Amino acid sequence: MNDIAQRVTSLRKYMSTEGLQAFIIVSSDSHSSEYVADRWKVREWISGFDGSAGSVVITPDKALLWTDSRYWLAAEKIVEANGYELMRDGLSETPTIIEWLCDNIDEGGRVGTDGTVCSITEIDAWRNGLSVKGIILDSSVAPFDTLWSNRPSIPLGMVEVMPVDIAGESAADKIMRLRKALYKEGADGMLITMLDEIAWLTNIRGCDVEYNPVVVSYMIVTARDAVLFVDRRKVTSDIGEYLQSQGVSIAEYDDVWSALKKYSNKTILVQPNKCNAAVREVVGEDKLLYRDSPVAGMKSVKNEIEIEGFRHAMQAEGVAMVKLLHWLRSTVKEGGVSELDVDKKLTEYRKECAGFCGLSFATISAYGKNGAIVHYEPTIKEFSMLEPKGFLLLDCGGQYNFGTTDVTRTIPLGELTQEEKEDYTRVLRGHISLAMAKFPKGTCGTQLDVLARQWLWRAGENYLHGTGHGVGHFLNVHEGPHQIRMNNVPTHLLPGMTVTNEPGLYKSGRYGIRIENTMLVTDYITTEFGDFYALEPLTMVPIDKSAVIPELLDKDSIEYLDSYHSWVFNKLSPYFEGELLDYLRELCAPL
């Protein structure tokens, strides 16, 4: 707490010197990443809150943290300890950051923020909102190199190549596809800022960001050139030769700014809600063409080799998960098992699988009431011991060098209440209803979201997070542009897209339930009414049946669950024998 207080005080002194009445600090980096390298964890440094989403506002007498419902319970403890006020983002009674500033900053006041880590869209929205009250936004202030002593540098993880027999398409061919897309958009070039887009386009991977195998870099692609801006110390001669063979030249990471200043083509495409605002200050508004990134759409539709890689990764993950479930069955009754032990044991089992590279996100191993904290993560200082009763919510994923996994299972550890069983069954029925969906071409995820929620709604229950997100191919576990959620995301679902199916329910102080499979959008049928699509499961992990109340499921739901388990058994049984094979057979038996 003393460290946090000193850091806030140092920022307030800077604000006073610069004539700022408030300062906004966001969670992102210069590349609009969800997970950021240590260098860009400024919001965590000044607040102590380490969730992946949230923003801080500091004034001379206030310190406030905005974060969404996933983190409210976790953030409560942090803000109380560090002298912050929690602003529950998403509630109707909670003002937005701009609304709060307009109500609390005098007309003519100045608000500062670092434009190198805020998107063009953010800066424009903030500036317009504040101008109504005559408040000025200065996005050119970046004090943290000075205020943060020993601030981490940009990571120096070495660049690696994803072979084309795993990527399924050469970087040269991807870049050619991008050039055709830019031509259709009327753009002379494109600045790519998103790290996963650069990794996918060039078929390179790295270790600069925890959980995400990406390389901190920028890229400019024109009709003639493709330049990767990256610290040259991270690129071996072999990698340099590979990139050159794909038509990609290399320049230093910071050289992107001089390259943008000298950019001589007419227009350069940027995605305004992903491109940092400092780019506009360098290039000028007149040369920027605001469009969605063509790379995001290209990357979201997996080719056949990528899909096969996903299947391989899901199979490896399934084997590890079955071993873990078997281990839990015996050890929890004996006692002495913690939430941390679950994560550690699962990682041990994953390491037995060829191609395992690490986690795709921090494991959520949440027992009992901790399961109600949507993004709970046990720590060495704070964790719970498992008991032979109630639920363990386990949300986990692995990075394999041929695919990325994301799976959640709610695991009964012993006796359950009638309420727990009813809630579990309703969540499961929603999961199955979405999994069985058939839908016409042109459907977006928002139109399917109700399928997963309907059984909870009938009981007056709901969850506040999205129902599904894309999953990258040995890349970021959260991938767009498509999603399944209540608020409108208009991107159409297309064959080849991966998307999770993860309805849940959270009762504060009691328990949490979530069941998640990664799905693949596939062709279904073509009729006189057009093309129709379906969702095919990729995840190969048994879903616990002991908490199910069969009477709350219809015939189709039961048949789907039995069919899913028959498929899982056929996929995983070759990897087991003896007691483990018998256990898998039990897990996959018909309901």
Image (cartoon, rainbow, N blue to C red):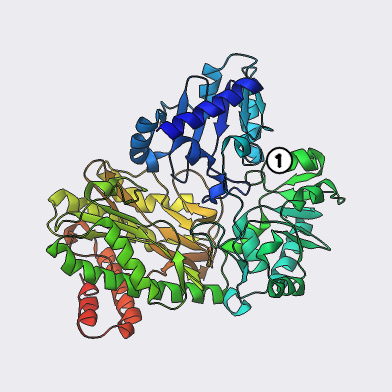
Assign the C terminus to one quadrant of the image: bottom left
Residue visible at 54% across and 56% down in the picture: 209
Locate residue 327: give its quadrant. Answer: bottom left
Locate residue 574: give its quadrant. Answer: bottom left
Spot occupied by residue 545 in the image (x, y as percentages of width and height)? 21, 65
Using residue 306 as the reference point, say whether residue 412 is left or right of it.
left
Residue visible at 79% across and 58% down in the picture: 183
Using residue 553 as the reference point, say whether residue 10 is left or right of it.
right
Q: Establish if 220 lies above or below 461.
A: below
Residue visible at 64% across and 69% down in the picture: 203
User: Extreme front residue here?
Assistant: 150
Using residue 439 as the reference point, say whether residue 407 is left or right of it.
left
Assign the N terminus to one quadrant of the image: top left
Front one among 118 and 175? 118
Using residue 129 as the reference point, say whether residue 70 is left or right of it.
left
- What type is the residue that disc 1 sits on? Ala
Can the viewer see residue 487? yes
Spot occupied by residue 218 in the image (x, y as percentages of width and height)? 69, 55
User: Extreme top residue here?
Assistant: 107
Q: Establish if 153 lies above or below 65.
A: below
Front one among 339 and 398? 339
- For mark 1, what is the residue? 278
User: Extreme right residue here?
Assistant: 264
Q: Establish if 124 lies above or below 549.
A: above
